[in-house]
Amino acid sequence: MNNKSRLKSINGFKSIYPDEWIKLQYVQKIVEKTVESFGFKRISTPSIERRSLYEVKPPWSEGLISQTFSFFDNQKNFLTLIPEQTPTRARMVQELKKIELPIRWYDTSKRWRQEDKVKNDRAKEFWQTDIDVIGCNSVESDAEILACSACIYKNLGLDKEVEISINDRKLLENILFSAGVKLSDCYTAVKIVDDKEKISKTEFYKRFKKINLTKDRIDFIYKAISLNGLIIDCVKEINALNQEIAEKSSKILKRFIRLSELLKWYGIYDMCKLDLSIARGSFYTGIIFEISDKNKNLGALSGGGRYDWLISMYGKRNLPAIGFGFGYMGTMEKLKECKLLNSSSSKSDIFVSCENPQKNYKMAIELVNILRKEGCVAEVDIIGKHDDTDRFKVFILFKNNFYKNSIAEIIVKGKKKIIKINDFYSFSKKLRTSQK
Amino acid sequence: MNNKSRLKSINGFKSIYPDEWIKLQYVQKIVEKTVESFGFKRISTPSIERRSLYEVKPPWSEGLISQTFSFFDNQKNFLTLIPEQTPTRARMVQELKKIELPIRWYDTSKRWRQEDKVKNDRAKEFWQTDIDVIGCNSVESDAEILACSACIYKNLGLDKEVEISINDRKLLENILFSAGVKLSDCYTAVKIVDDKEKISKTEFYKRFKKINLTKDRIDFIYKAISLNGLIIDCVKEINALNQEIAEKSSKILKRFIRLSELLKWYGIYDMCKLDLSIARGSFYTGIIFEISDKNKNLGALSGGGRYDWLISMYGKRNLPAIGFGFGYMGTMEKLKECKLLNSSSSKSDIFVSCENPQKNYKMAIELVNILRKEGCVAEVDIIGKHDDTDRFKVFILFKNNFYKNSIAEIIVKGKKKIIKINDFYSFSKKLRTSQK
């Protein structure tokens, strides 16, 4: 490796400069304000965990483990940069001394995955906001997580652009079982459904044939998981589709009816639909959902679901939980596409300079002292450059003859003014007010 | 390793729960508001860099490299979790397409070091806010960084508790050279001075003898670096101490005189002193400083300095720079000691519940919808528990007979009220206003 590439950043890791950061921060603030209004409290987790934390999950999470950054520390602990936060939260719930239910936690931080050796430019470091309700398995908590997720997209102005596709993991399993999938093949079958959008119909059939399903049974699965629409309509269709599934899933379907009521009260029913092809990760046990671009250009932007047994794998406490992970990457792309990211620059509002620093710099410092104390963002000249008047809304120049003639030159949005020192303090007060 | 310890967190990594997070967040917000008022713009850097980024520094940074978490990715890149951010910023300056000087950058994020195999409970993951002025070597930029650092501690209420100890790296080197330290031993000598507080006087002498200094020359160094006091007084003492040093350092001393003027205008002169024993890291080239607890219980809380050649090591741009790293760990301890960390809990203000969810939950959701839209933090009951009235400032219970008698029971700070539905909206409006 030559010297230049030795000092370059690594593919998949982004250095974010100020103009890009304010866009990310704008989105983060809306996300966080929304989840906080629902009563979610912020935690902060380590970025590194023991690798064994990720080994308690069901077999087909293995793909995830192989994508992690893992290494040994100087104590020979085998560690992993967190690829997701659910195992960490399970650990934190188990390590809590006193517990008050329900727990509502959120956090915005980075996750790391080296997804693919081939597609080397894929993001390996990405921001995510995770919210969880822990210790509660009511349909009201399902509705709350969905409402909170939907509200985030509403508050971002994307409610017309995205849709929330809901399914229930047990309902999907009931469909698979009644089509003859064996219990031991369940994860494989769920994975095929999960990959449905990525693979051809031929491949879909081929993979189900491998677990010994006949064509007509695969036809049945294909037809069943193609069901989607408004919750109430879809529940009716499931009832009509197959009596065995309807009976085995009657509790789930009743819960969907109640859920649809709750979603109406939250004002988000029309953003949601049932979609029986939604499958998601291995540890979900109940309702699952994905938020995606209606035009399907960007795939799933965010997602979540209920995981009622996972926490018990990490200690004595056995608590149900439901969570949602807000993904910044896809959502930011969608916001850019819709021109919903404010293009306000990261520049400061006020700049204070002086022609003769030896004489007038004291005045400049004293002015910025006041402005900053009042909450303004004010730069003072440290470089002796005072011809760059366009970069700031307000540009203040103490002229060379400031002390003699008691005047400063002030340029507000390109318009020049000369101000007497006697008027200066009333001017700067006006300035402080107008900048806030 | 048994199953239990396999799932435990690692020593030195902290899981932060909500009540602790609001304390950290309170400090972060003050730090960030302060640096933003000076015009610093936020960036966000990768948490991982090529290890070679840390290999361009002078030899006695090697200690730092050996303390990093380093590992190979699946592309066989040798990577490092960032132990500090200066090399990253140097890289980012070199990778910028267009550059406008001066650059003022800040960022709050995590750093990682496995400092010591023995003291296994030392923090290995810690938060830091770094600020830098890049592209400017004026004394005004030195003063700005010092003023910004001091303002942070002022705004935290710690200005009476901390002091800023200032030195100049070249001045220290001039002292060492005039005492006979050879150029090739310069780093070793600076390191001995840097360790002065940690080692005994005997050890101090022993280590200088190893680089062939006689006792009277070490006496001279010891006396010189023991100088400390207000800047102006100290400059006089240096002038009186030794003519050779005074002459070789005349530019530095003049700069200190101008600096003391600037610090007075910023209103922070009395928080600062010259302390010739301050040495700091290897890459500094001019002014260096540390902010420490006046009682010396906690050592250096934060520090920084000028590094005029480092950026040029990372590419074609040759830009001077000065930076400051705000350390959260020590400062948080000091704030706790001074009882300056607000102990406000992370609990939500408003809780809405109902005795009969089947009948009244719609009302509850509609109320929280309004409250949240207005910016309130309002929890809705998802668990059917409505006897826990003490946990919230405002507890609203829709009684079973709400629809019949049109009343809700409302408990505000422990006091129970019964409210008619006709009065409810005016009440909830009052509530919204009072909670904001």
Image: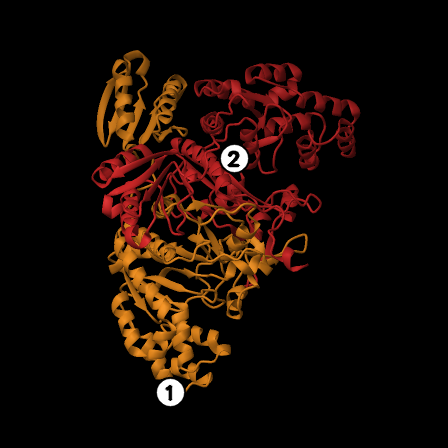
Chain colours: A orange, B red
Nearer to us in this view, B346 or A324: B346
Q: Is residue B243 above or below residue B26?
A: above
The amino acid marked with disc number 2 is Phe
Residue at 58% of width from left, 14% of height from top?
Answer: B233
> From the viewer's perspective, is the residue at label 1 or at label 2 nearer?
1
Label of residue B326 in the image? 2
Secondary structure beneath label 2: strand
Nearer to us in this view, A334 or B165: A334
Q: In this rendering, would A303 be left or right of B125?
A: left
Label 1 resides on the chain identified as: A
Residue A300 x, y percent position in the rendering:
36, 63
In this orientation, does residue B252 appear?
A: yes
Label 2 resides on the chain identified as: B
Residue B263 x, y percent position in the rendering:
47, 21
The residue where tag 1 is placed is: A215
Residue at 23% of width from left, 41% of height from top?
Answer: B421
Nearer to us in this view, A12 or B412: B412
The amino acid marked with disc number 1 is Lys
Q: How many marks?
A: 2
Neighbours of disc 1 within 10 Å: few (<14), some (14-19), many (20+): few
Q: In this rendering, would A201 be left or right of A313?
A: left
